[in-house]
Amino acid sequence: MTEKNEIAIIEHFSREELVGYIQELIAKDFPRLVQLLYRLDISEAKLKETLATHTDTDAGLLITQMIIDRLEQKRKAREEFGKKDWGGSEEERW
């Protein structure tokens, strides 16, 4: 799975599928998980804080929720960006 395709694929995972995928990455391919979180622009500081303050919760669940939240933020940003009236002619937009 290529890096770009990986994000497109996980966007369509159910919550349970995503939890399983993240848990698998934690156990078998941690560098790939770190890379995925970087590409999703998930704050390392926020991740560390979340894991440190929720030590009684499975890390896979916490990371999954952070991914879901970030994907939702990105979706909303794309919608807002698409609605924005840039004014001017089509040529001026470029």
Image: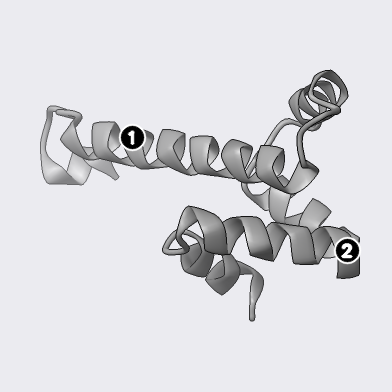
Image label count: 2
Name the colour scheme: one colour
CA separation, marks 1 and 2? 32 Å
Q: Nearer the viewer, residue 12 or 3?
A: 12
Under circle 2, the secondary element is: helix
Q: Please, which residue is most extreme toward the front here?
A: 56
Please state the horizontal and vertical placement of residue 22, each as a whole percent of the image.
Answer: 71, 58
Please state the horizontal and vertical placement of residue 2, each as a whole percent of the image.
Answer: 64, 77
Query: Residue at image x 65%, y 69%?
Result: 3
Q: As drawn, is 4 to the left or to the right of 89?
A: right
Query: Residue at image x 44%, y 33%?
Result: 73
Q: Please, which residue is most extreme toward the bottom here?
A: 1
Q: Nearer the viewer, residue 17 or 37?
A: 17
Callout 2 environment at 10 Å: few (<14), some (14 to 19), or many (20+)?
A: few
Q: As drawn, is 11 to the left or to the right of 23?
A: left
Q: Which residue is the site of mark 1? A: 76
Q: Which residue is the site of mark 2? A: 27
Q: As drawn, is 51 to the left or to the right of 43?
A: right
